[in-house]
Structure formats: structure tokens, C-alpha cells
Amino acid sequence: MSSLMLQNPTVLLHRGTNRCSSPPSDQNPCAGGDCRTIRFHHRMRNLSIRSELAADTNNGMPKQSQNLSFPLLVNGCTGNMGKEVVKAAMNIGLRVVPVSFSSREGPDRVVQVDGVDIKIHGPSERDDVLASLVQQHQGLVVVDFTLPTAVNENAELYCKVGVPFVMGTTGGDRERLFRTVHEADAYAVISPQMGKPLVALLAGFEYMAREFPGCLQGFIPQVMESHQTSKKDASGTAKAFIKYLQLLGVKIDEEQINQVRDPMMQMEAVGVPKEYLSAHAFHMYNLTSPDQTVSLEIQHNVCGRSMYAEGSIDAAIFLAKKVQSKADKKLYNMIDVLREGNMR
Ligand SMILES: NC(=O)C1=CN([C@@H]2O[C@H](COP(=O)(O)OP(=O)(O)OC[C@H]3O[C@@H](n4cnc5c(N)ncnc54)[C@H](O)[C@@H]3O)[C@@H](O)[C@H]2O)C=CC1
Ligand SMILES: O=C(O)C1=N[C@H](C(=O)O)C[C@H](O)C1
């Protein structure tokens, strides 16, 4: 068990200071100088979240009994999304448990996010540490942004210790993932895409597929996605779109996704701005009618990661509310989160 936990088991982090000492980022555009605008922005967001949560009727439960200031643990704080989610959580005053996990062993590992130390535990400590945190922090929710190789084991761990979780990580064995959650009857939000505009676009395709199955019968598909070279798997978002395209009658499978990972090609052929080579997600779906007289093109291009981090926090808030209200339905996707008006 971690020394941090033994010495200070209830330490939780708030980012409520008046001074911004952090460098500029997607989340924090103030350049360490005049922070009034960003502080105002953070405060307004904080207030709007709190009032939104307070306004919830929660199936007739008294509003005061909804302690929605739940603790959040972000898994994968060694990675890019993990850090981004911690920043987004602290920006709105959510309590972040300063612990995260890793696939590698190593004593006394710490990562810093916005000046906050987060203790990293390896696989041998993971189960005990998480079980103990679940006991210490009532209402704990985990957000997972790790790697495709970790998806299934992590979900199994969250189910074993009984902690609700948001799974933003793509890949792994998705059937096994859903089976794990279903069999454990666990609370979870699982989605390869956390960004509000894209969740809405996916919802549009879900609608099309439900209402007009087969309407793109025979259309010839081309799917291209470009991500930073460190991305290990094919786009989970593209895979989700492909499921809808299949229902619309398009003959396509995931193997046909053209993954662009070469930075030169990303800049020259895809049009990715140089400064976003290390953090972008560009997608293009091209569908041509069998006689080649009609073509449809859907494109979504995202630079940076803040959109996903914001959406993950929305998902965590949504899930905390579901747990508190003891909702019968337990497994959700981001369309559920959007549908209930839970995305800011
Ligand atoms: N759902 C969504 O909207 C989005 C999903 N993603 C997905 O999230 C995942 C992470 O993305 P990035 O942060 O960009 O990758 P990254 O490579 O920057 O970070 C992943 C981190 O997870 C760590 N890790 C590996 N195994 C672990 C384990 N068992 N426990 C804890 N940590 C472990 C790695 O050491 C690494 O530091 C990817 O699958 C990516 O596709 C990324 C952005 C948005
Ligand atoms: O790894 C990423 O960066 C992203 N992963 C998700 C995916 O695979 O669809 C979402 C977005 O494309 C960014």
C-alpha cells in the first residue's frame, strides 16, 4: 500500500487558488500573467455545474441528499488524456484523488499535473490500493484513459472492487469489456468518443441507421483517420461509425480503415497543422454510389484533447448521479449522457 495513502489517506485536491502559475495549454490559455479572465471562466463553469446538479430532482429524493461533489480518480495519469482530464476536473473544483496506476512497477513514482503530485502504483499494488480507496472515498468514480492493452484488465478490476467507471480508452476486446460490465452489474459509461459535437454526430448516424436501414446499399466506402504517431490502435470513433454504415447497407469492415500515422503525410496530405501533430484526430468517410454519380463525404477534425476531457467529466458527473439515484440502468454510452442534457 502506498505511503501516501497511509500518511494522508483522505487528501483530495482542489484547484481553487487565485493565481495561475501553470504554463498556457488547451485548458488554460492564460500565459501565467493576467489570469482574471480564465479565473472568471472557471468560476462560471463551476457555478453552472453546481447549480445544474442542485436543480436535479433525482427521482423525488431531497436535493440536499445528493452529495454530487464526488471524488474522482483518473487512471492513466502518466499519459496525455489522463493529465488533461485531471486538469479539467480541477478547473471545475471536482475532488481528484491524487493516485493513478501504471502497467510498470517502480517505487515512489509521481507525476505532476498542474503542479499537483499524483502517486503512481504498479500492477502489484493496484488491486489493494484501489480497494482501499473505494473504502475511503465514498462515491468514488474512475475515469480510464490508458491503452488498448489495459482496457479489459482495468474494467475487470473496477468491477471487482465495485467502483463505477468511465471508460474512454479505445480498443481491447470490446465484447469482453461489455460482458464484464454486464455480468458484474456495474455502473459504467463506455465510449470511444467523448466530444460533444461528435457524440451528436454519432447520435445522428444512430438515428439514420434505425430509421433508414439499408438506405446506402451498395455505396462504396473509403475511411481514413489520422492521429498522433503514438496512437496504438485504429480509431475507435471510426469503428463506431462503421457499425452504423453497415446498418445503412454499406459493405465495410474495420480492417478497411486507412490509418495515417506518418507526420509528413499528416501535414501534406491530410492538412494537420504542424503544432497539432502530437494531438489530433482527423477523420474522413467517403461514400460513393454504385454508379459513381453520388458521393457523400463526412469529415470531422479535432485538434488538441480538451474536448474529450470535458466530455469525460460530463460523463463522470452523469454517472455519479446515476449511482446516487440507484438507477436501474447501469451501462451507458455518451449518447445517453448527451440525451439527458448532461454535456455542458
Ligand atoms: N474516448 C475518447 O474520446 C478518447 C479516447 N482516447 C483513447 O484513450 C486512450 C489513451 O490515450 P492517450 O492518453 O492519448 O494515450 P497515452 O499513450 O498518452 O497515455 C496512455 C497511458 O496509459 C498508461 N498505461 C498503460 N497501461 C496502463 C495500465 N494498465 N494502468 C494505468 N496506466 C496504463 C501508459 O503508460 C500511458 O502513459 C487511447 O486508447 C485513446 O485512443 C483518447 C482521446 C479521446
Ligand atoms: O487516441 C486518440 O487521440 C483518440 N482516440 C479516440 C478514438 O480512437 O476514436 C477518439 C479520438 O479520435 C482521439
Image (cartoon, grey):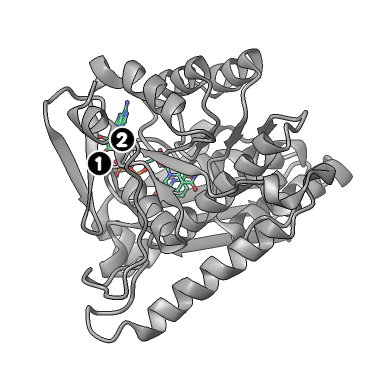
Q: Is residue 332 above or below residue 316?
A: above
63 left or right of 151 in image: right
Q: Classify 10 Å Cα crowding around label 2: few (below 14), some (14-19), many (20 and above).
A: many
Name the residue beneath numbered marker 1.
78
Q: CA distance from mark 2 to mark 1?
A: 8 Å
Residue 307 seen in the current view: yes
Residue at position x 41%, y 20% from top? 131
Left or right, residue 315 beside residue 235? right
Q: Secondary structure at mark 2?
A: strand
Q: Residue at x 32, y 82 (%)?
A: 35
Q: Relative to residue 227, is residue 170 depicted above or below?
A: above
The residue carrying mark 1 has its beta carbon less than 8 Å from ligand 1 = yes
Q: Nearer the viewer, mark 2 or mark 1?
A: 2
- Estimate the x, y position of residue 257 in percent, counting from the top left: 49, 40
The percent coordinates of residue 148 (x first, y second) are 39, 29
Tell me where residue 180 appears, x and y as whole percent. 57, 16
Q: Do tag 2 and tag 1 residues touch (Cβ < 8 Å)?
A: yes
Q: Secondary structure at mark 1?
A: loop
Amino acid at pointer 1:
Thr
Q: Is residue 19 above or below residue 10?
A: below
Q: Tell me the quadrant of the picture where the N terminus can be found.
A: top left
Disc 2, ligand 1: is the CB inside 8 Å?
A: yes
Q: For the C terminus, which image quadrant? A: bottom right
Q: Residue at x 49, y 14 (%)?
A: 160
| Quadrant in the rendering for residue 122 | top left
